[in-house]
Amino acid sequence: MTIQIGTLSEIMRHPVKSMTGEAVTETMVMNYGLYGDRSHVILDEKQSFLTITQFPSLVRYQASFSAHESLDGYPEPVIVTPEGVTVKWSDSTWLKELETKTSKQLTKKVYHPEHVPIGPIEEEHLLILTDASLQALEESWGKQTDQRRFRPNLKLNLFEKTPFVEQAWEGKYLRIGKEVLIQFTKPCERCMIITVDPKTGEKQPELLKKIAQEHENFFGMYARVIQAGNISTNDKVLLLDEV
């Protein structure tokens, strides 16, 4: 069975792993996920990723690409620091400041536009949320919830506002626009990262506790790319039982 369940309302990618990313109106879906998602990473002296888990204030850095997408090479990311200073990825100043703040020796790494591996991208190619589930969580928590906490790639605007219906989609497929096909693989199990406020860097552990108590610690769905292509906001999204 194939039915249109809604539209694609938002596309979000994170050019630098664990920094706040950017919302775009159109992009390419690659074999690994959204073009450039987690394509740039920061490594410590043990060659482990520097993430919000180790340094929560990293979420207060905002990264976006400075030019149009290219398969020959990524446009250089532009980073806005918590102090409001705009710097380029190639600038060494912000990295030295991060070294001081984290007491770690840090280096930068960039993957190729044709492929970003699982690792910098968490567990699966794409992370998807629905407007209905976000609204229900806000109402349950009793606070306005910044969706950037959940680091989604795609947000769906559902015709039928049934909260958490997406957890029944495991194994099913989603057609986005005319070209892209993805398959839902499993619910996203949450960790402390969602407790960090993207604006202030402050932790609010009660959010994770609520999701653990009410939703078995799952929020959002992972999906893998079956067919790459171009997507845009307002694209139709079709749910398929099989292909």
Image (cartoon, rainbow, N blue to C red):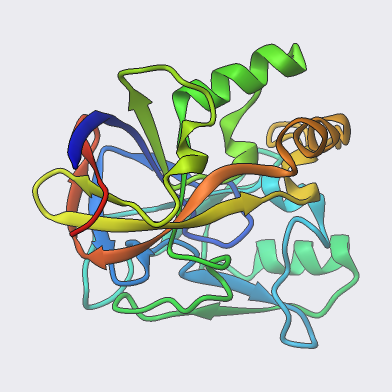
Q: Work out whether 158 lies above or below 68.
A: above
Tell me the residue at 42%/76% (across/down): 116
- In the figure, is residue 195 to the left or right of 25? right
The quadrant holding residue 128 is: top left
Q: Point out the image quarter for the C terminus.
A: bottom left
What is the residue that sits farthest to the bottom in this orientation? 46
Tell me the residue at 26%/49% (across/down): 241
Residue 73: image location, x then y, percent: 29, 75
Q: Point out the image quarter for the N terminus.
A: top left
Tell me the residue at 21%/29% (across/down): 234
Tell me the residue at 46%/24% (across/down): 131
Foreground residue among 100 and 221: 221
- In the figure, is residue 156 to the left or right of 170? left
- In the figure, is residue 7 to the left or right of 80? left
Foreground residue among 91 and 196: 196
Q: Work out whether 204 lies above or below 194.
A: above
What is the residue that sits farthest to the front in this orientation? 1
Q: How many marks?
A: 0
Residue 126: image location, x then y, percent: 43, 57
Residue 160: image location, x then y, percent: 35, 17
- Is residue 236 in sight in this rendering? no
Q: Work out whether 47 lies above or below 200.
A: below
Foreground residue among 173 and 26: 173
Q: Work out whether 112 lies above or below 137.
A: below
